[in-house]
Image (cartoon, coloured by chain):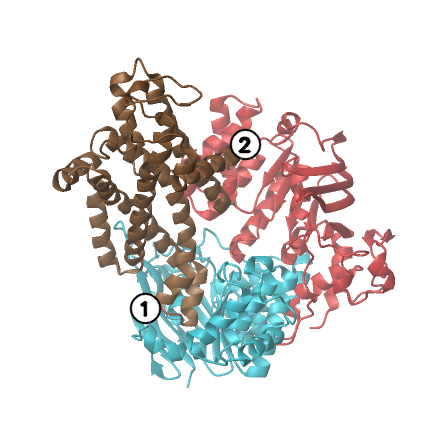
Amino acid sequence: MSVSTQPTRRFIARPRGLLLPLALLVLAVLAAFTLLPGLIAPHDPIALAMADRLKPPSLSHIFGTDEGGRDVFSRIVYGTRYSLGVAIVIVFASALFGVVYGAISGMARQGIDNLLMRIVDLFFGFPALVLALAVAASIGRGLDSVALSLAIIWWPGYARLVRGEVLRLRKRPHVEAARALGVSEVTILRRHIIPFVVEEVNVRVTTDIGYALVAVTALSFLGLGANSPTPEWGLLIRDSRPYFGSAWWYLVFPGTMIMLTATAFSLIGDALASRRAA
Amino acid sequence: MILSVRDFSIGFQREGQNLVAVDGISFDIEQGETFVIIGESGSGKSLTGMSIAGLQPQNAFVSGSIRFKDREILKRPDAELRKLRGPQIGLIYQDPLSSLNPVWPVGDQIAETLTAHGLAGRDEARKRAVEMLERVRIPDPHRVASAYPHEISGGMRQRAMIAMALAAGPSLLIADEPTTALDVTIKAQMLELLAELKREMALTIVLITHDMGVVAEVADRILVLYAGRIAEVGPADAIMLQPSHPYTAALMTSAMISQTPAKQELNAIVGGAPGLGAFPPGCRFHPRCPRAQADCRTVEPPRRKIGAVELACHHPIAAAVPLATARN
Amino acid sequence: MALLELDAVSKTFSQRRGGRAVQAVAGVSLAVGKGETLGLVGESGCGKSTLARLALKLADVTAGRIRFDGIDVTEFASRRMLPIRRRLQAVFQDPLASLNARMTIAEVMREPFDTHGVKLGANLDSRIRELLSFVGLENIDLQKLPGQFSGGQLQRIAIARALALEPEIIVADEPTSALDPSIQAQIVNLMLRIQRKRGISYLIISHDLDVIGHVADRIAVMYLGVIIEQGTATEIMERPLHPYTQALLSAAPTLAARRQAGWKRIMLSGDPPNPADVPSGCRFHPRCHLARDICRTNAPELRAMPGLGQMVACHLAPEETARTGAEVGRARRGMQAVG
């Protein structure tokens, strides 16, 4: 399984009709799940209740139960802060580092810029899975290990994006005009370049959260991420493997959740991008 | 008469409001003449030109009538108008890159004009494409025909665009600001080329511009547009030598910069053209007009004729200082 | 002593993927005196915009020196340039593009003061209002963004900003080209007015001969990186001696001249030149109808014309070009040719 960190450039179509409101609704639900899981989840996500194991969806367990009798819905709700939370942390951290790195590279002399970008290339070429395994081997499995390896994989994309934008903006007429006025390079960066870069980065961050989520859950699925009994979505899918045939709800609902979340972020990212392109 | 426009209006819906960009204009274009539509930003000149070719923006609403060779073409379905574009009506723009497809060789694009309208088979069309490139005075037409747009110089792209517009032998050529972004010497080349092609191919040309020099050089008849309405329309000599509408007069004098003694202040019109949706009541030029009076501020000026010129003004300039004897 | 002096300035760009270097500017010398206007005229590819950027120290020269009020500023880095920049300001072609779209007009106008540490305290706002008033924008809303103004208004704001620190010279790169004709006249008037009231010098770069001929005291004509003719405005406009200048003037005559039957212009063959592919000898020879063998091999130097005021870089001037020059000058003004 390849962990894609570089979404291909696609046409930026503003999500039409109901799509955007739906995406925002999903976002609101996710926020609720993250911040107030106790209020929403009807059952304890961790406590075992063997009597109810592998029950299909019903009124008391709307997403059914898992092999430990735990309510799948509640596990999903509590799992949000792990799966989505880690994804957000990864993206924000790598964006922050990448932006600083890219800005320095973009403003620097050609020699330093080249050097910094060769380093970025090095990171780009690194196979994500191998790195994740290596990190897991050294600091142990778990969400923090996954977060670290994904952040290392992710930041070069931002560095390149920001460096490209900075280079482009440096030649813009309004930057030249500021230079002719005598404005210092640092102030030019702060006042005349960064605000425009940030717009672009925001778009990327939003879409990337969806991709990061898929990556986190994938690594957990492979066993490198969260450990039982953490209700992380990828782990739920992993745990559901023996029961694919008999307990469809165990796989379908967590999987759908991942898909919905990733799609929602992608749509919102598109909306931001189309507003920028307008 | 090759083109007849009656009460033509075009507008847009923006935030629930109907904004009218061109407001009920009427004019005729005779066969074989060069008809120049002059206007500055916000005058609606490009919208008018595009509408003649049926290429107005999709979200625009239009009304009135445009008759080409005595056939109504406004509001006709695009499938019908597409048959006109190419064989009957040709179009050139300011920027050749917007009409040339970057991933096709130039010759193929010209040939497509012919094959799409069933005027020639593939091989014949390719041959005629090369002939057309030669006709627009491109040296080495075979090389250019197999080249991509980015591989040839800007000047040649201009000519290639003209070749494409004229390949199917239209009788009407609409040129939307064709010389605006060009260097002076290239502008001169293009005007000479258009004049020659007009003679050779018996074209009627509708040229849209704000460049007075171009107008002076090529216009047979002129239409002066201001803020979506006609200020003045008539023979070029009459209008240029003795402008009756204050806006036209102001345009002429501000273009006569070389006849104002050096370093002296020019006769400039104050203010700027009103934007869409911000048109003043009455005569739209009144806030900037040195001759404005009470009726100009409230009543739309009627169309009247002074000799061969039609204009819309309450208080036209009676005996203007003719262009030819301006201070020098 | 000249206020701004460019001494044998060259700028060569190396191509990334091999290939020949692009000689944008080759050995250009110019001087702008106090209170005078020097017009630099040329078409695309002549290097005039590059020259503007060199004069403003927005790019480094490959050779030559730049002097401001006698001080050699060629090697000055941005810190040392700061006090110079206060005296040397710029106005650019596209007023919307040369302003930060996300800054309000108030912020735009404050920037020069902040940058040069000029603290006016409570007086800052009234000074800004005064500047805007001076350029004809009395009651504009300072909290609006550039995108909410017209081209003409924006260019006035740009000029007001350039005047904020009371510079001695303004370099204007195509200041009217992006504007409607009626607005162009307004901006020309504004620039003339500013010069009359403040004694500011201008280096105006343009392809518009009408504007240059009207506002300049002296004119330099540029072609493919070199100055090919230089003189007073009267000399250049009434008796151009270089074949290129003649073609340029004859290509854009007065309105009256254009409508005269039988008026013929000097046509240049070929496309505008490519600075990556500079011809040998005289750079203009491929398009010149007078070209001889010597033109193809020897690059002519810019030299003074005996008995006439201007300097021309042409082997055949003035002997073979003077007569055409006089004709072009007359024809351009719509007067009949003599003889």
- In the picture, the disc for residue C231 is none
Q: Residues under labels 2 and 1: Cα distance? A: 57 Å
The tint chain A carries is brown
Instruction: Indicate which disc residue A18 carries.
Output: 2
Name the residue nearer the viewer: B171 or C154: C154
Question: Which lettered chain is shown in cyan?
Answer: C
Label 2 lies in what chain?
A: A
Compare residues C129 and C273 and report the one nearer the observer. C129
Residue C115: x percent and y percent?
Answer: 42, 74
- Label 1 secondary element: loop
Asked if one can make out residue A13 in the rendered structure from this viewpoint, the answer is no
Q: Disc 1 is attached to a residue of which chain?
A: C
Give the side of residue A223 with respect to residue C236, left or right: left
Q: Quadrant of the C terminus of chain B?
A: bottom right
Task: From the rendered image, report the letter of the chain displayed in red.
Answer: B
Residue at 38% x, 44% y: name it.
Answer: A204
Specify the amino acid type for callout 2. Leu
The residue that disc 1 covers is C61
Label 2: how many Cα within 10 Å (few below 14, some 14–19, many 20+): few
**Lateral position of residue A184 relative to residue B134, left or right:** left
Note whether B178 is above or below C322 in the view shown: above
